[in-house]
Image: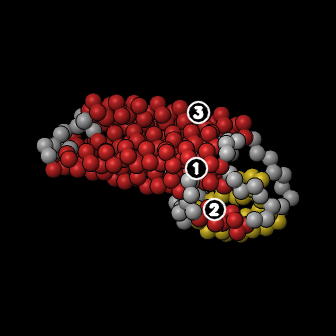
Amino acid sequence: MDKSLFEITQMDCAAEENLVRMKLDDVKAIRRLDFDLSVRRLTIYHEGKLDTIEKTIHELNLNTRLLKTEITDEIDVDDSSVQKSLLWTVLLINFSFFVIEALFGFISGSMGLVADSLDMLADAIVYGLSLIAVGAAFARKKTVAKMSGYFQLFLALIGFLEVVRRFIGLEILPDFRTMISVSVLALIANSVCLYLLQRSKNQEVHIKATMIFTSNDVIINLGVITAGLLVNWLNSGIPDLIIGAIVFIIVTRGAFKILSLAK
């Protein structure tokens, strides 16, 4: 059996790990995938077909390069039942906070919270796709991925247009207390998801700091919290609109990654 090590420099969070899993799901030569998000690396145990594996990963446009390939006698054991349980857990956490952030985003008038809610929805979609993909026909996977990707693009476009409307129209001052409070809760939720997913691969009771702070989700949460502080300090809604626009762009980028699964 071959053991190939890849560096995927734009694999920033567990949702992108699952994008890679889904993309490689139909490569029959693959026997096991081991991810290390803290250093953005993937070890693949496979029986030949290295060219096919490389081509498939590159289609995700995550800046991937092969570091080395060697022969190994390691046993190819993969506990899929544990993986499914974790996917359900993080899916429910992300979807719940999508609802919470969207609701309080509209109540508080914060586009940063609304945008962050869509980022949570994007992650929930990826985890849901991962669960749907198990045992599903290739055509069905492509169809679901395409529908999910376009739906996410549609929501991001509406959100971005609302940001533009607020920039050129009457300025709305969001409730900075709600922004900060809900974002702190979302930060905790994302950290819990990262902890659960990382612990499934490593039985240590802590998470490496690099694992947390290289995650786009956590960085976005910190960005909304910072925007809330600036809204209060400057008495202006502009910081909220700026972080909202940035997050909508990130959500759009994620939608194109999902659509790449349908190729």
Residue under label 3: 89
Q: How crowded is mark 1: few (under 14 residues within 10 Å), some or many (20 or more)?
A: some
- Percent of width and height locating residue 1: 83, 61
Q: In which quarter of the image is the C terminus?
A: bottom right
| 258 w.r.t. 113: above or below | below
Single out the residue that lies furthest toward the left.
170
On the rendered structure, is 94 left or right of 115?
Answer: right
- Percent of width and height locating residue 37: 59, 53
Q: Residues within 10 Å of mark 2 (few under 14, many from 20)?
A: some
Q: Of label 3 and label 2, which has the lower sequence position?
A: 2
The mark closer to the camera, 3 or 2, is: 2
Q: Of label 3 and label 1, which has the lower sequence position?
A: 3
Q: SS class of the residue under badge 1? A: helix
Residue 171 sits in quarter: top left
What amino acid is at disc 1? Lys
On the rendered structure, is 186 left or right of 38?
Answer: left
Residue under label 1: 142
On the rendered structure, is 2 left or right of 82?
Answer: right
Residue under label 2: 56
- Percent of width and height locating residue 71: 82, 66
- Please tell me which residue is depicted at 37% across the width and 34% down the height of the picture: 101
